[in-house]
Amino acid sequence: MVIDIVTLASICKLAIEGGNKLLEEFKKRKLSEAEKELLVAAAKDGEFHIMQVNEAPDWIRAGGKYFPNDITGDLAIAEKYHDAFESLCKRGYIRHDDGILFRLTHAGFEKARQLARKTDKKKANKHQPN
């Protein structure tokens, strides 16, 4: 599977420039677990890198994590994260910066940090004695 960076960049740009009405409708849809994972991973620095290596499935790096993070090369898992990334672009949460680099938009940072706080609270509550 090859992620077409030019196409992703166009999708991100179109979503941001496409008008608030379409963007707001798309944002109303519930985020998938894969979308949430990508946002939480990028919450600190807001960067995504689309990594491409010869025969291997492409992957996305965010916050030092790789998606997919398995070594099996399962295309279904790779596609799940590619679709999630594309969806985040369509929501206006990600913009193309340059080459393989994509960044969270202001709205993307807000959503990512909101999700990261929820995740941190869940982790903290999980480790609390009863």
Image: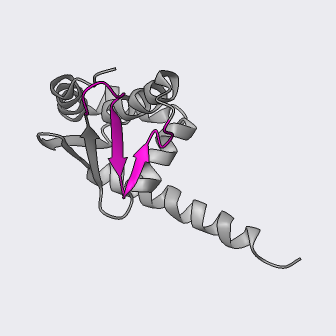
Color scheme of the displayed model: one colour
Question: Does residue 126 lie above or below 26 as drawn?
Answer: below
Is residue 18 at all visible to an observer of this figure?
no
Specify the quadrant of the image occupied by residue 106: bottom left
Which span of residues is magenta-colored?
53-71
Quadrant in which the C terminus is drawn: bottom right
Q: Position of residue 14 (x, y in %)?
A: 19, 27
Q: Residue furthest bottom?
A: 129
Specify the quadrant of the image occupied by residue 10: top left
- Residue at position x 43%, y 35% in the image: 27
- Residue at position x 30%, y 24% in the image: 55
- Residue at position x 33%, y 50% in the image: 107
**Residue in the foreground of this view, choosing between 59 and 96:** 59
Quadrant in which the N terminus is drawn: top left
| In the image, residue 67 lies in the stretch drawn in magenta | yes
Is residue 105 at all visible to an observer of this figure?
yes
Question: Does residue 48 lie above or below 76 as drawn?
Answer: below
17 horizontally vs 116: left or right = left
Q: Main secondary structure of the magenta part?
A: loop
Q: Position of residue 16 (x, y in %)?
A: 22, 35
